[in-house]
Image (spheres, rainbow, N blue to C red):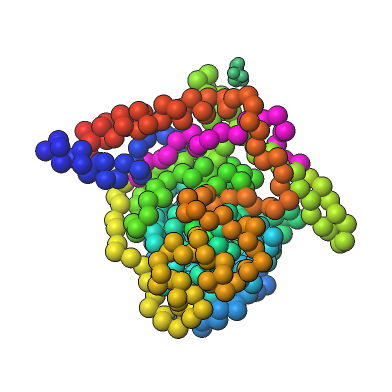
């Protein structure tokens, strides 16, 4: 009996290992300030999220919904083959279903999807070959959020909804990381004094990647829906004395307003970049499905059918040429198949990490993480 329970716990260990006390966030409310979208919806979006809208792979709709493991969207390039960090402001929505007047993600793109609902947010973590929605092979990706350098949204006019509360709701704070092989998307659906949406859906850790900013189960070939505990806000590291150390990514960059180039600096040059999130929140009530698909055959692009039948590794090794796009992007094509995090954001970011000093406990926590996780698995087995 114990052996069987242990095996069950191991099977979901990636999702449930909990090595530190969970984040205490009080009593979150969907009506807290900063939760629901109150300003106008983007001009290229339909007024409300809708299923079964006409398929238009040139759509400019920037309305993304996160409803379930097989009904979600991500932002992606308007012009296939453009490096996403260069065009964040113009990205458009791509959805697993025909919805929101948006573009549709072709079947065969997504190889794993994990949909987790927590008291503070819903989160989607997906793996696949996102060159099929126009991401450049090897592109480590970009970070989309409702702010952007000019605070007009990245993309400008991008909006998000979820129906996990029982009805379609527009939400104000969210973040979406997209790379050629990984997508993650968090929408904050409730807030509290301890967990304001601006912290839980914080958007300034562009280069840290999905696993750091949205910790969870990123196992490939799994399609699952789980309830989950809420993660500590990205970059928050509780300290033994009860205080919290907050990591702010260091980068500098520039943006153009009315033809004028403006500079900005985030974080501090002498800080240390942690290697992992403080913890991976536990999940429960996970239900798996075999796969997700919409059955829209016409969407599978003819141009990439030869490479897709040659397995997904084609995308990482020769994707730039075999998919017929981005032929001039050889420099950004990091072949080699390692599962790089969706990251990088602004292409003008520089000096994103510093290698000296220490990570205020984050590194030592990471070092002991494997043992702690194992201990948690064992503990979990007895709790089941
Ligand atoms: C749409 O996005 C903008 C920019 O982030 C935001 O100010 C606005 O509140 C959003 N509208 C809705 C209805 O969510
Ligand atoms: C929310 O979306 C899911 C997935 O499309 C759907 O199955 C469910 O019925 C929707 N729920 C509500 C309350 O609209
Ligand atoms: C690491 O940071 C802590 C807290 O700031 C400090 O006390 C400690 O001396 C630092 N260790 C090193 C090796 O820099």
Q: Nearer the viewer, residue 340 or 280?
A: 340
Of residues 22 and 213, which is closer to you in this image? 213
Q: Position of residue 223 (x, y in %)?
A: 34, 59
Where residue 234 sits: x, y (%)? Answer: 55, 40
Give 327 or 384, whichever is nearer the viewer. 327
Give the residue drawn at x 61%, y 54%: 143
Query: What residue span does the magenta drawing correspond to?
Result: 265-283
In depth, the one of 201 and 125 nearer the eye is 125
Residue 338 visible to the viewer: yes
Please give left or right for residue 352 compared with residue 119 in the image. right
Which picture quadrant has residue 313? bottom left
Q: Position of residue 275 (x, y in %)?
A: 53, 35
| Quadrant in the picture for residue 102 | bottom right
Ligand 3 located in image quadrant: top right
Q: Is residue 281 magenta?
A: yes
- The answer to whether any part of residue 170 appears in the image is no
Answer with left or right where residue 169 lies relative to residue 344.
left
At x 67%, y 72%, the residue is 43
Question: With respect to residue 98, does 130 lie above or below?
Answer: above
The secondary structure that dominates the magenta segment is loop
Is residue 317 located in the magenta-colored stretch of the structure? no
Direction from residue 115 to residue 142 in the image, left or right: right
């Amino acid at each position: 009996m114990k052996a069987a329970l242990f095996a069950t716990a191991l099977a979901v260990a990636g999702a449930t290992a909990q090595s530190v006390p969970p984040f205490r966030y009080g009593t979150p409310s969907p009506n807290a300030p900063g939760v629901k979208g109150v300003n106008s919806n983007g001009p290229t979006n339909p007024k409300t999220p809708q299923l079964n809208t006409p398929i238009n792979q040139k759509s400019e709709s920037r309305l993304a919904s996160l409803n379930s493991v097989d009904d979600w969207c991500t932002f992606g390039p308007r012009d296939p083959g453009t490096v996403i960090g260069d065009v964040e402001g113009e990205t458009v929505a791509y959805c697993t279903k025909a919805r929101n007047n948006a573009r549709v993600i072709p079947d065969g793109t997504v190889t794993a999807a994990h949909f987790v609902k927590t008291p503070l947010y819903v989160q989607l973590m997906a793996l696949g070959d996102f060159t099929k929605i126009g991401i450049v092979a090897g592109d480590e990706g970009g970070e989309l959020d409702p702010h952007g350098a000019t605070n007009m949204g990245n993309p400008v006019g991008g909006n998000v909804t979820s129906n996990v509360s029982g009805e379609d709701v527009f939400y104000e704070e969210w973040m979406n990381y997209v790379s050629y092989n990984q997508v993650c998307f968090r929408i904050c659906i409730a807030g509290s004094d301890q967990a304001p949406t601006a912290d839980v859906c914080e958007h300034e850790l562009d280069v840290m990647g999905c696993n750091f900013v949205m910790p969870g189960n990123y196992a490939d070939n799994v399609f699952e829906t789980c309830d989950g505990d809420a993660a500590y806000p990205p970059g928050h590291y509780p300290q033994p004395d009860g205080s919290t150390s907050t990591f702010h990514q260091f980068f500098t960059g520039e943006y153009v307003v009315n033809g004028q180039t403006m500079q900005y600096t985030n974080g501090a040059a002498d800080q240390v970049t942690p290697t992992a999130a403080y913890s991976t929140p536990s999940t429960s009530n996970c239900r798996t499905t075999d796969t997700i698909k919409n059955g829209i055959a016409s969407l599978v692009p003819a141009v990439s059918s030869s490479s897709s039948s040659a397995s997904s590794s084609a995308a990482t090794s020769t994707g730039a040429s075999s998919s017929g796009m981005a032929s001039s992007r050889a420099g950004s094509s990091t072949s080699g198949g390692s599962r790089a995090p969706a990251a990088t954001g602004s292409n003008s970011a520089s000096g994103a990490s510093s290698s000296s000093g220490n990570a205020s406990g984050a590194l030592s926590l990471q070092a002991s993480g494997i043992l702690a996780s194992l201990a948690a698995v064992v503990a979990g087995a007895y709790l089941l």
